[in-house]
Image (cartoon, helix red, strand yellow):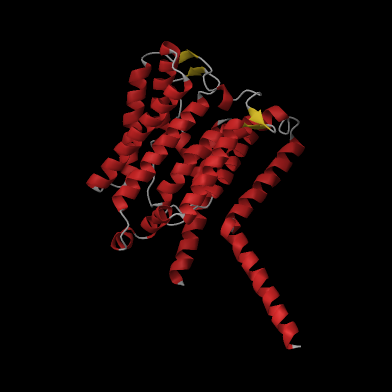
Amino acid sequence: MTHKMNDDKSHNVVLQRRAFDFQEYISGQEIVILLTIILAWILLGSVTDTFFTIGNLKTVLYFVAPLIVIGIGMTAVIASAGIDVSVGSQLAVIMVVVGQLLRDYHLNGWMALGIALGIGAVLGAFNAFLITSFSIHPMIVTFGTLNLYRFIALQIFGDEQVSGIPATFGIIGGSSDSSVFGIPNATWIAVFLGALMWVYMKYWATGRHIYAIGGNPDAARLAGVKVKVRLYQVYILTGVLVGFAALISLGSGGLVQQNVGIGLEMQVIAAVVIGGTSIVGGRGTPLGTVLGAILVGTLSSAITHLGWPNELTNLFIGVCIIIAVGFDLIRERRRARK
């Protein structure tokens, strides 16, 4: 009898460990987002004849690849209690510079990659410098650099768009040939980068420092965390990922228009906060951001297929941000009461 009771206890312990391990990998909010995406796809497939076509699904997944890539960096930024609303303007600067170099000087892929990532790193570092050196709120700093970087991009553009860009990065472009198992290569790469960032933020000490800074920067500093160094890292990383997202957008060649990147920051922030990253910092995962980006892409595609005005995209994304932030603040207040 005693032996049987011990076996039952051991079995219960194993089940508890399994449940705990599962919760370690995916949160309740991420499950809700995944189920929402599945439900939305089923509904769209039932009310439209074109949503479930191979071409449209590839388009949706290719569209979300840059959102995922930039969102990975934005997850770290927001988890550290910061924000970067200049990413759309950063993208514009990088795309116009690299686009002109590809067109006029026929750069090879590796040179273009280095230039794109280098420009992104410089722009991100400038944001971090202003934030850490002058103790200015990240929203104020990056709102200012949003306009500064957009001005720089327009000056480089001149009076016309950049056309005739060769398809140097066709392997991550939007063509039907650049896919594996029907999923665009760019999306595979974006998800892989998200997985790497998830591992870093969850299991590496320097990655967990990001959450510590977002929870309480003063306490993190007293615990030995190099707060300024980590903030430089997250903003530079975001700039570098913007550079890679620019290459994805340039993947199939073509042209770069002067309005490129406008509104991108709103979509990226929506993907991050919908994915469960706390807007006040201290919590969030790249996995949630991946799912949030897919939901944002699904929303944009739904409006197109339903024949609704494109202006509704920003409206619905804004509503989603308000709802996600509202639920997040409610959760934070409940935790503070415990």
Q: Is residue 48 something that shows in the picture?
A: yes
Rendering coords of residue 326 (x, y %):
49, 55
Rendering coords of residue 244 (x, y %):
47, 32
Relative to 19, does residue 278 appear above or below in the rendering?
above
- Residue in the foreground of this view, choosing between 47 and 61: 61
Instruction: Classify residue 196 as left or right of residue 179.
Output: left
Residue 243, quarter of the rendered image = top left
Residue 241, quarter of the rendered image = top left
- Residue in view at x 61 percent, y 38 percent: 299
Please give the count of numbered marks on the rendered protein: 0
Rendering coords of residue 206 (x, y %):
39, 53
Instruction: Classify residue 254 as left or right of residue 227.
Output: right
Instruction: Classify residue 181 as left or right of residue 139.
Output: right
- Residue in the foreground of this view, choosing between 127 and 303: 127
Q: In which quarter of the image is the N terminus?
A: bottom right
- Residue in view at x 38 percent, y 17 percent: 157
In this view, the residue farthest toward the front is 3
Q: Is residue 85 something that shows in the picture?
A: no
In this view, the residue farthest toward the bottom is 1
- Residue in view at x 54 percent, y 46 percent: 195
Rendering coords of residue 285 (x, y %):
51, 51
Residue 297, quarter of the rendered image = top right
- Residue in view at x 32 percent, y 24 percent: 152
Relative to 190, does residue 205 appear above or below in the rendering?
below
